[in-house]
Each structure stands twice: as C-alpha cells, then as structure tokens.
Image (tube, rainbow, N blue to C red):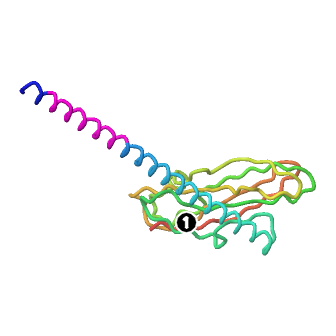
Amino acid sequence: MSFIKSKKAALEMSMTTIVTIVLVVVTLVLALVLIRTIFTSSTNAIDQVNTAIQDQINNLFTSQGGNLQVYPNSRQITLNRGDTPKGFGFSIKNPEKTTATFSYNISAGDVHNCGASFTADQANAYVLGNAGSLTLGPGAILNPYILVKFDIPSDAVPCTIIYNLNIVETTPNSNAFPTNIFVTIQ
C-alpha cells in the first residue's frame, strides 16, 4: 500500500510541475507580446509626430515662401531644466537651377541674460546636432527636415539664450540664410 501511495504522490508532483511550467511559458509569451505592442505603438507615435512636423514645414514653404523655414515658426522654444532633449526642426529649399551643397551651424549668439559667469561655450554644449552639410537637387526642399535638440542639465541657469542658425550655400554660389532661435530655459 505504501508503494501505491508513493506512485500516486509522484504522479501528482509531476502533474503540478507540468502545469507550473505551462503557466510560466504562457505568462512569458504574453509578456513578450505586450512588450512588442508597446514598442510598436511608440514607434508609430514618433513617426506621426515626424510626419506632422514635416507637413507643417511644407505648409510654411507654401504659405510664406522663402528658402528657409523653421518649426515652430515663432522661433521661440521653452525648455525645462533636466527634461528630455527637445528642440526645433528646419528645412531649406535650394533656390538654384543646379544641385547645391549647404552647410549649417547652430551656435550661441547672445548669453548675457544668463549672468556674467555664463559663457557661449556653456550654451553651445547644450546643443545636439549643431552642424552638418547636405546636398539638394535643383529647386528641391530638404525632406526629412533637420532636427536640432537641446539637452538642458538640471542645474542650468533659468534664462533666454539667443542661438544663431547659419545656413550657407557652399556650391555653386555662396548664399547665406541666417536666422535666430530664442531658447528660454525654465
């Protein structure tokens, strides 16, 4: 009788183990599906934001003309200290009838509102994606736009910094498209 009880106990133990393994595998699969869904939806949200900004920039070229458009078109950005990097987008239109090469640079122009000890080098350190070059075909508009972000540290001084966005056509001519971006740090 003791032998029959021990076989019955062993059978129950193995059934419990099998049920536990099945439950763990099902939970793992559901967790992976959930994670994949979250990443897919966040990627779609980013794509929608990028599309919306590109549409706004294209609308600005249509409604205002010109060879340089910045979004937001107010050229004023308010950023919170220690927040995730945010910034502005810009696009340019090649006014030439031939292919043209452009270079761009973003640098601090006026930092006097940030105190006497604050320097332009400190303000330039906040900029992510501050320089580059590109080539556009005749009459082409840069698509996708260029995104410039600012990484403001949590110990930054609350103030307004005026950044210079300088775009220069390096070939075939030497046209310049300068503008200012006002970044307020809160």
Q: Is residue 2 magenta?
A: no
Identified at 80% across, 59% down, the residue is: 141
Q: Quadrant of the N terminus?
A: top left
* Classed neighbour count for the residue bearing mark 1: other residues with Cα under 10 Å, few (<14), some (14–19), many (≥20): many
Give how far across and how far down residue 88 sits, in percent. Answer: 61, 62
Q: Is residue 29 left or right of residue 98?
A: left
Which residues lie in the magenta part? 7-25
The three-letter code of the residue at mark 1 reads Val
Give how far across and how far down residue 184 sits, in percent. Answer: 51, 68
Identified at 82% across, 51% down, the residue is: 136
Residue situated in front as seen by the camera: 105 or 4: 4
Q: Is residue 10 left or right of residue 109?
A: left
Give how far across and how far down residue 156 sits, in percent. Answer: 42, 59
Above or below residue 27? Residue 18 is: above
Residue situated in front as seen by the camera: 6 or 86: 6
Residue situated in front as seen by the camera: 25 or 112: 25
Above or below residue 8? Residue 152 is: below
Which residue is the extreme one toward the right?
97
According to the picture, the residue beneath numbered tag 1 turns out to be: 183
